[in-house]
Amino acid sequence: MPASVPTNLKEKCRALPDKPGVYLMKDRLGRIIYVGKAKSLKKRVSSYFQRGRARTVAQPKIRALISLITDFDIHEVKSEPEALLLEGKLIKQWRPRYNTDFTDDKRFLLVRVDEAEELPRFRLTRLRKDDRSRYFGPFAHSGLLRKTLAQMRRQFGVLLADSTPTRLPDGTWKLYDDVREEIYGGENVVTGETYRARVAAACEFLEGKSREWLASLRAEMVAAAAQQAFEKAAELRDVVFALEETLRKTRRFERGDPTRPARDEEALRAVQEALGLEAPPRAMECFDISHISGTFVVASMVRFAEGRPDKAGYRRFAIKSFVGNDDFRAMEEVVGRRYRRLADEQKPFPDLVVIDGGRGQVGAALKAFYTLGLNPPPLVGLAKQQETVIFPDARAPLNLPLAHPGLRLLQRLRDEAHRFANTYNADLRSKKIRESVLDDFPGLGPKRRAALLAHFGSLEKLRAASTEEIAAAPGLGPKRAGELRVFLNQP
């Protein structure tokens, strides 16, 4: 940016409102090169054009950004939480060059697995290269990630970066020296084929952990925004974006994996054997309850067919029978709603129902069937702390080996239900933040706001409605409808 700021930019800065919003910096070709949010658009945007700013900034990338700015646009919003959400939406839409650079500068840890190696290892890295390796992450909590890798080494018998395996004369591999052999479970001398099967299982486990962390990060991001911790929320949002992109690439990789159907069949038969089922559970459904400090209590149900997610069968539930935080009552309600509907429609029940939780949640689910006079299908709980299988009858709790293919399938099912529930919870909280814009329209009380949103279904549909359509909603005449439409569509 030249030392002398162009007159047109000075005038634009003077006209900026002292209100929250999002700004889009452009280069001389009109390309959006940076998107940012501000508590005060006037103060924040003007700071870019202070005399000599480009020379005094320490970071080279920020100096380069300032030197390229020749114009900007703004979007004024009601509040900082709304600015945070809009900023994320516009970064996803435009993918500005300098937002990507700033995100990369945080250099969160990734896990890299190079499957071209004879014995692939799980390594930590901070740089994603354009190669044929598989990457997992980024992960914001390095301590938790390192503990997870240590767990994977014990659980699956895979190699980390510090391992020094030895090839034996018969072509097999000795993975660890004598000391480590006593520490880690599983066979220490293996063939390359056996070891690669371990790597595949560990990758599935790590992907499941990634999805679980993604759901947790989303909920944490929305909670931080609601608490006005906007810098933390923005940082979490960047990690969420990057982790979503990694999972998207991982799903594409897995669709081309020809060994996957055989592994799914093995896992289904392992579940059958471990739980004493009459046949492999071709259709499984899992329930989870999600809330944040007792608010926004919701539930999810995910369905697996032939060991894989059947997303057309996913369902999510808002709790209707009570207000408050009671996981047992919530579980009884949603299980009852699900299977009463299937019974009414004369549709088959799944081969296995899995409940995320312990004996209390399992008892609540079973109560739902008995209250409705329905015969329950095979049903178990998966208690997360020790990954314990809980039966609804007199059988003792079951702790399967962590590398057991049946347990891994149940974990994937449970983790997907957890992710889906947390995503719904976060969506509701985000929607609440967006809808708060109606609070600033004078004379619109809580009941009328609720009626408007119920009539149109969402703030976006209300904003797109004509004056006549708004006037047709309960409690609004033509004059107030026109004023509301102008209010909602102001710049």
Image: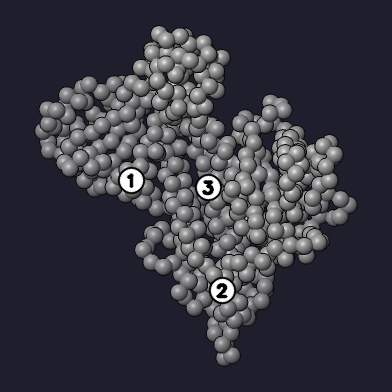
Instruction: Determine the residue positioned at 59% across, 90% down.
Output: 170
Sequence-wise, which precedes: disc 1 or disc 2? 1
Residue at (30, 45) in percent of width and height: 96
Query: What numbered label is drawn on residue 196?
Result: 2
Work out how far the residue at label 1 is from the one at label 3, CA to CA, in angstroms.
20 Å
Q: Position of residue 151 (x, y in %)?
A: 61, 61
Mark 3 or mark 1, which is nearer the start of the sequence?
A: 1
Could you tell which of marks 2 and 3 lies nearer the N-terminus?
2
Q: In this view, does 315 lie to the left or right of 123?
A: right
Pointer 1: what residue? 95
Spatial distance from mark 1 to mark 2, Cα to Cα? Answer: 37 Å
Kind of residue at badge 1: Arg
Alpha carbon of mark 2 to alpha carbon of mark 3: how far?
27 Å
Residue drawn at x 46%, y 42% as measured from the top left:
236
| Quadrant hosting residue 92 | top left
Left-right relation of 254 to 54: right
Q: Mark 3 points at which residue?
A: 214
